[in-house]
Image (cartoon, rainbow, N blue to C red):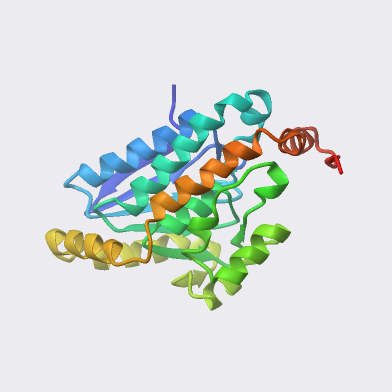
Amino acid sequence: MSQPFRVSIADGIAELILDNPPVNAFDSAGWFAIADAIDELGRNDEARVIIVAAEGKGFCAGVDIKELAEHPQRIVDVNRGNYETYRAIHLNPKPVILALHGFVLGGGIGMSGAADILVASDCARFGVPEIDRGAMGGGAHLQRLFPVQKVRYMYFTGEFIDAAEAYRLGAIEKVVPRDQLMDTAREIAVKIAEKSPAMVKLAKEALTGIEDGDLEAKYRWEQGFTLEAYTVGDSQESRDAFVQKRDAKFDQ
């Protein structure tokens, strides 16, 4: 079975390119595979820095809602796969750069919030439609990107923000045209790859250790509310409506 991504390493720079048409949404197996690949790059001495990017219309649309609509019991596996992917990025001994374009949703937000450096194309849009999909999660990682009130506004309304606003809020290092995105990420990666791997590893561990709170613990806290949400009928109705392309009908 082919993986929904491809990996390459050259000149100390590893690239993991998501490639799962049409929208780079992943089922539980896909999330575990991404986590394993990123962990392996962290152990590979040939890689000094990691770039995660994507093919297609957008970076990542998150989890495969169709899988969860058909098999809601798989939420436990999806939750764990998401957790492992974000952990693999955040706690990786190597710096992880994300090159973002198009839609950055759900799991795309999780990966972005776990990363060290973000660059984005001017077409990138960030959102957390979790409430509209009958789930929770993403808030911990979104709050690593944006201020608290902006996070709550995005979460409660489901509204997106664009790359320019994300840059204004300090989450994005550079915003560039789509055709310059990978070159921009690689330029940053080259600067890092030229440095002492031992010193960079120490710096990553030190910087992660001085962050406020435990990102992984915060996310696991959120995931408990996802499981609780799945006991509410409105959660299933949200997923069914999304798959069936209709408006959801909720009990009052």
Looking at the image, is 200 positioned above or below residue 83? below
Residue pushed farthest top? 1
Q: Residue at x 51, y 71 (%)?
A: 175
Looking at the image, is 217 positioned above or below residue 178? above
The answer to which image quadrant residue 245 occupies is: top right
Residue 201 picture location, percent across and down: 19, 59
- How many marks overall? 0
Q: Is residue 96 left or right of residue 141?
A: left
- Nearest the viewer among 23 and 206 is 206
Residue 155 picture location, percent across and down: 65, 58
Residue 211 seen anywhere in this rendered image of the structure: yes
Q: Pick the quarter of the image with the C terminus.
A: top right
Residue 2 picture location, percent across and down: 44, 26
Q: Is residue 132 left or right of residue 80?
A: right
- Nearest the viewer among 248 and 45 is 248
Residue 100 seen anywhere in this rendered image of the structure: no
Residue 67 picture location, percent across and down: 62, 28
Q: Is residue 25 left or right of residue 185?
A: right
Looking at the image, is 200 positioned above or below residue 38? below
Q: Residue at x 63, y 27 (%)?
A: 72
- Nearest the viewer among 113 and 23 is 113
The answer to which image quadrant residue 115 occupies is: bottom left
Q: Pick the quarter of the image with the N terminus.
A: top left
Residue pushed farthest bottom? 168
- Nearest the viewer among 63 and 135 is 135
Q: Residue at x 83, y 41 (%)?
A: 248
The answer to which image quadrant residue 225 occupies is: top right
Q: Residue at x 85, y 42 (%)?
A: 247
